[in-house]
Amino acid sequence: MPEHCKVTAIYTYPVKSCRGTSVQSATISPTGIEGDRQLMILRDGKFINQARLPSLATVATRRIDDMSIEFGAGGDSPLAHAISADGSESEVNFYGNRIPVVDQGEALAEWVSSLVGENVRVAALKATFTRAVPLDEFAVIDGNDQSRFVDVAPILVTSVGSLADLNSRLATPVPMNRFRPNIVIEGLDAFGEDEVSALGRDGLRLIRATHCERCAVTCTDQETGARATEPLATLKTYRHRDGGYAGGVMFGAYMAVEGTATIRVGDTLNGENAE
């Protein structure tokens, strides 16, 4: 593995399962990227994601500041929303964890519902919760305090080399946004992220937990919400492991975080080999 990797892209997702934003820099801490996944979508009082509601990909989101998010869709005028702590409260099941959430009001719910074609609500996290992930491969994450709606780990890293390898096997190449990473790096061989134990720089260390196992979201166009069968079908032919925690199709690496620092596109991260 090369000693150094270069950051080629950084993405944030202010609203879980909606379209993300490419940014030039981001502050990263043990809870993840600042402003990432501050809100989530509910349907019938339950958490809903893009795997079950592909049209969420048509909802563009951009962080304005610590407590404000801009929602957009195509050529329509964007909607700026100030995150509220005063809405009705409920508890939802979030990957086995019961967590308290606060509804974000009628105006935003109606705006998003009209775009995705179903009645949905938008919610914010009421309080930090302790995330239980009772699997050995997630030991570096299990029990961490969490203040965002991240699936498992605070950071997802993908590599340019891995996407190039996958695209060489596809009739129609796919962009990296299909994999919804936080940080994209180059400098590794294809799937070299499997062998990394950590990536770091002054004040920050990303510690590899395990493979990210992929679902139908990878087959969803992140502009239109259209759903196909690729690239998941091809990934299954050569990137599948038995006994995985979520289907076993691997692309990218989940990372825990030590320290706090701002990283920028073009920064170098020092790689550490797994022993």
Image: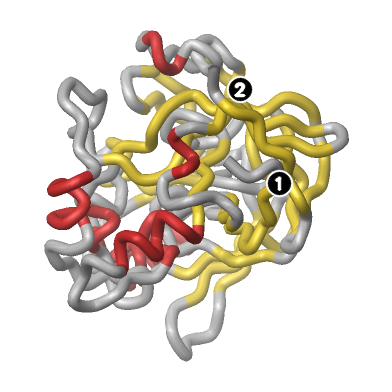
Figure disc tally: 2
Give the answer, above or below, for where 36 lies relative to 144.
below
Residue highlighted by disc 2: 128
Neighbours of disc 1 within 10 Å: few (<14), some (14-19), many (20+): some
Residue flagged by tag 2: what amino acid is it? Thr
Is residue 96 in view?
A: yes
Q: Position of 106 compared to 240: left or right?
A: right
Residue appearing at x 35%, y 45% in the figure:
251
| Type of colouring | secondary structure
Residue appearing at x 50%, y 53% in the figure:
159
Q: Could you give the CA–CA distance between mark 1 and mark 2, rounded to whole angstroms?
A: 34 Å
Indicate the position of residue 100 as horizontal and vertical percent values.
48, 24
Tag 1, which secondary structure? strand
Residue appearing at x 46%, y 58% in the figure:
161
Checking the image for residue 4, the label placed there is 1
Indicate the position of residue 61 as horizontal and vertical percent values.
53, 65
Q: Position of 31 compared to 201: left or right?
A: left
Indicate the position of residue 192 as horizontal and vertical percent values.
47, 43
